[in-house]
C-alpha cells in the first residue's frame, strides 16, 4: 500500500533521512513501557561498568565516551517510547548549559526526526478516529511521514487541489503521560541534579502542559484563536486549520513550504534577512506575552519555517503557557520598570514569585536577593535598550556561566520560584537561543510589558 504514494519525492523535499527505520508498534501499556525503562537502566549500568573498567587502566580517562554511550541508549529508548518521555529529551536539548554536549547533540534529534510509525499503524489510527482510512478522506495521502517528533508525526496530503499537513498523534501517548513521568524521574535525578521537591514541581508542571499538548481538539481551538490574534504581525505566516478534518488525535492544516532554521542558515542568508526573521520572532513572542498573556511555549527550531518569500512560518501551537497576573506583574516589573533599582521593592517581588521564602533568615534574604538580582539583570539586557545584537558571544557566555555557577551552589538545590518559571524561562531562553543562532540585530521595544 505504501508504494502507491509518492513518498520518496516528499521525503527528499523535507530533508528526511530515507534510511531511518520505521516503527511498527509503540509500547502502550504501563508494563511494556516500564520494561523499556528497566532495560535502558541495565544498559546504562553496563556503560558505567565498562567506563570504570577502562579507568582502572587509564586513570586520566574522561567521561566523554560514557556520556556518548548513555546519551545514545537513553535517546534510543525515549524515541521508541515517544510521547512525554521523548518530549522531556526535546526540552532538555534546549537547555545547553544543563547537560553534557553528548546529550544535547543526541536529544536535539527529537526536535526534527524520531523513528516514524509505519503505514499500517497510521491507517489503523485514522480508522479508529474517523471510521475510515486516510485515502477515503483526502484526494492524496503520503503514508511516509515528512517529520516525526515527540507527540506525533506529520504527513503530506492533498484535498481539492490544496496541499495539507496532517499531524497524527502516536497511539497511547495521552494515556501514558503520568506513568511515563514517574519512570523518567530516576534519569532526571541523575541528569539534572535537582532536589526531589524541585523535581516534583517540574514534573507536575510538565505533566499539565503535556496533557494539553495531547488534546488535539484544544490545540486546534487555540491555534485558530492565536493565529487570528497575531494575523497583523509583520513577516509572519500561519497555516489555516480545518476542524472538520481534525479530531482528538489528528489535526489537518495548510502545508507551509519552507526551510527549518538549520537548513536556512546553510543557505548563508544576508544579515538583513537574518534581522528580518529575528524581528518577526521577537515580535511574535512579545506580542503574545504582553498583549495576550498566553504564549507559544515550545520555541524549538522544529516549530518554525522560513518561507520562500522570506517570512517566518509558525507551524505548531501544541504547547501554550498562560501567564496569570500574580506571576506576570511581579516578574515583568523587574525587567521593565524601576522596581529593580529599589531593593525593598525588588525583594517584595521576589517574595511574590517565591524566590525568597517566608522562613528565610536575614542572611538568606541577602544571598538570594543578590543572586536573583544578577540573574534578572542578565536576562533583562535585551529589554533595557531599544535594540539588541544577539550575535554578542559575551551575553550568552555570561548567561551560561551564571547557570553553571548556581547549579553548583547547595543553596539552589531546594525548590525556589513559582511553577510558571519552568515554561516562561524555557520560552524566553529558547527565543534567545534561536536569535543567537540567527545572529540577529533587532528592535526590542516593539511590544513592551504592561505592569502598571
Image (cartoon, grey):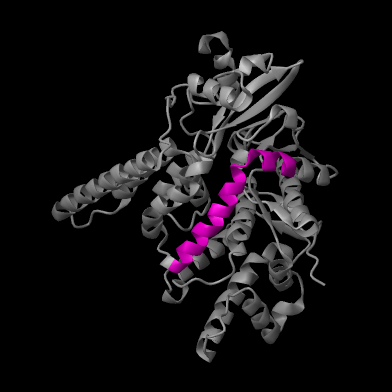
With 165 as the anchor, is 151 left or right in this view? left
Which of 11 and 442 lies nearest the eye of the viewer? Answer: 11
Which range is magenta?
197-223
Q: Position of residue 106 (x, y in %)?
A: 43, 42
With 115 as the anchor, is 225 left or right in this view? right
Disc tally is 0
Secondary structure mostly seen in magenta is helix
With 97 as the anchor, is 313 left or right in this view? right
Residue at image location 47% in from the left, 38% down from the top: 82
Q: Can residue 131 be seen in this view?
A: yes
| Quadrant of the image containing the C terminus | bottom right
Which of 276 and 339 lies nearest the eye of the viewer? Answer: 339
Residue at image location 56% in from the left, 21% down from the top: 11
Which of 234 and 92 lies nearest the eye of the viewer? Answer: 92
Instruction: Examine the rendered structure and indicate whether residue 324 appears above or below residue 277.
Output: below
Is residue 198 a member of the stretch shown in magenta?
A: yes
Q: Where is residue 133 in the image (x, y as percent from the top left)?
A: 59, 18
Q: Where is residue 443 in the image (x, y as percent from the top left)?
A: 78, 55
Q: Can residue 100 be seen in this view?
A: no
Is residue 158 a member of the stretch shown in magenta?
A: no
Instruction: Examine the rendered structure and indicate whether residue 14 appears above or below residue 392.
Output: above
Q: Which residue lies furthest to the bottom in this view?
A: 362
Q: Residue furthest top?
A: 4
Residue at image location 59% in from the left, 56% down from the top: 426
Q: In which quarter of the image is residue 257?
A: top right
Amino acid at each position: 500500500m505504501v508504494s502507491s504514494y509518492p513518498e520518496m519525492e516528499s521525503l527528499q523535499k523535507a530533508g528526511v533521512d530515507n534510511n531511518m527505520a520505521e516503527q511498527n508498534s509503540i509500547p502502550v501499556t504501563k508494563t511494556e513501557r516500564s520494561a523499556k525503562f528497566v532495560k535502558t537502566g541495565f544498559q546504562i549500568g553496563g556503560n558505567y561498568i565498562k567506563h570504570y573498567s577502562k579507568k582502572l587502566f587509564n586513570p586520566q580517562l574522561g567521561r566523554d565516551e560514557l556520556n556518548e554511550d548513555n546519551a545514545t541508549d537513553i535517546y534510543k529508548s525515549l524515541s521508541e517510547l515517544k510521547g512525554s518521555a521523548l518530549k522531556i529529551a526535546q526540552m532538555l536539548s534546549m537547555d545547553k548549559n544543563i547537560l553534557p554536549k553528548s546529550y544535547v547533540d543526541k536529544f536535539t534529534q527529537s526536535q526534527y526526526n524520531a523513528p516514524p510509525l509505519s503505514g499500517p499503524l497510521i491507517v489503523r489510527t485514522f480508522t479508529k478516529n474517523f471510521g475510515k482510512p486516510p485515502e477515503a478522506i483526502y484526494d492524496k495521502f503520503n503514508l511516509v511521514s515528512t517529520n516525526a517528533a515527540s507527540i506525533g508525526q506529520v504527513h503530506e496530503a492533498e484535498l481539492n487541489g490544496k496541499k495539507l499537513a496532517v499531524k497524527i498523534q502516536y497511539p497511547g501517548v495521552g494515556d501514558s503521560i503520568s506513568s511515563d513521568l514517574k519512570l523518567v524521574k530516576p534519569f532526571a535525578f541523575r541528569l539534572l541534579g535537582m532536589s526531589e521537591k524541585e523535581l516534583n514541581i517540574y514534573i507536575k508542571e510538565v505533566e499539565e502542559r503535556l496533557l494539553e499538548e495531547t488534546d488535539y481538539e484544544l490545540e486546534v481551538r487555540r491555534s485558530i484563536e492565536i493565529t487570528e490574534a497575531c494575523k497583523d504581525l509583520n513577516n509572519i505566516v500561519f497555516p489555516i486549520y480545518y476542524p472538520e478534518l481534525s479530531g482528538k488525535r489528528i489535526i489537518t492544516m495548510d502545508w507551509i513550504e519552507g526551510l527549518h532554521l538549520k537548513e536556512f542558515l546553510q543557505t548563508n542568508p544576508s544579515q538583513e534577512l537574518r534581522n528580518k526573521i529575528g524581528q518577526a520572532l521577537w515580535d511574535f513572542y512579545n506580542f503574545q506575552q504582553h498583549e495576550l498573556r498566553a504564549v507559544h511555549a515550545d520555541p524549538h527550531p522544529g516549530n518554525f519555517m522560513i518561507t520562500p518569500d522570506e517570512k517566518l512560518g509558525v507551524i505548531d501551537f501544541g504547547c501554550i503557557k498562560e501567564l496569570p497576573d500574580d506571576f506576570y506583574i511581579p516578574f515583568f516589573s523587574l525587567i521593565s520598570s524601576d522596581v529593580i533599582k529599589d531593593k525593598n521593592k525588588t525583594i517584595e517581588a521576589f517574595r511574590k514569585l517565591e524566590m525568597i521564602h517566608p522562613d528565610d533568615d536575614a542572611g538568606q534574604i541577602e544571598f538570594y536577593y543578590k543572586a536573583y538580582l544578577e540573574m534578572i539583570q542578565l536576562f533583562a539586557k535585551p529589554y533595557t535598550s531599544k535594540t539588541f545584537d544577539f550575535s554578542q558571544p559575551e551575553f550568552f557566555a555570561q548567561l551560561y556561566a551564571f547557570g553553571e555557577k548556581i547549579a553548583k551552589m547547595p543553596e539552589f538545590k531546594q525548590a525556589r520560584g513559582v511553577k510558571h518559571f519552568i515554561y516562561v524561562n524555557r520560552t524566553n531562553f529558547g527565543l534567545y537561543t534561536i536569535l543567537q543562532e540567527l545572529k540577529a540585530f533587532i528592535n526590542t521595544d516593539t511590544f513592551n510589558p504592561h505592569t502598571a
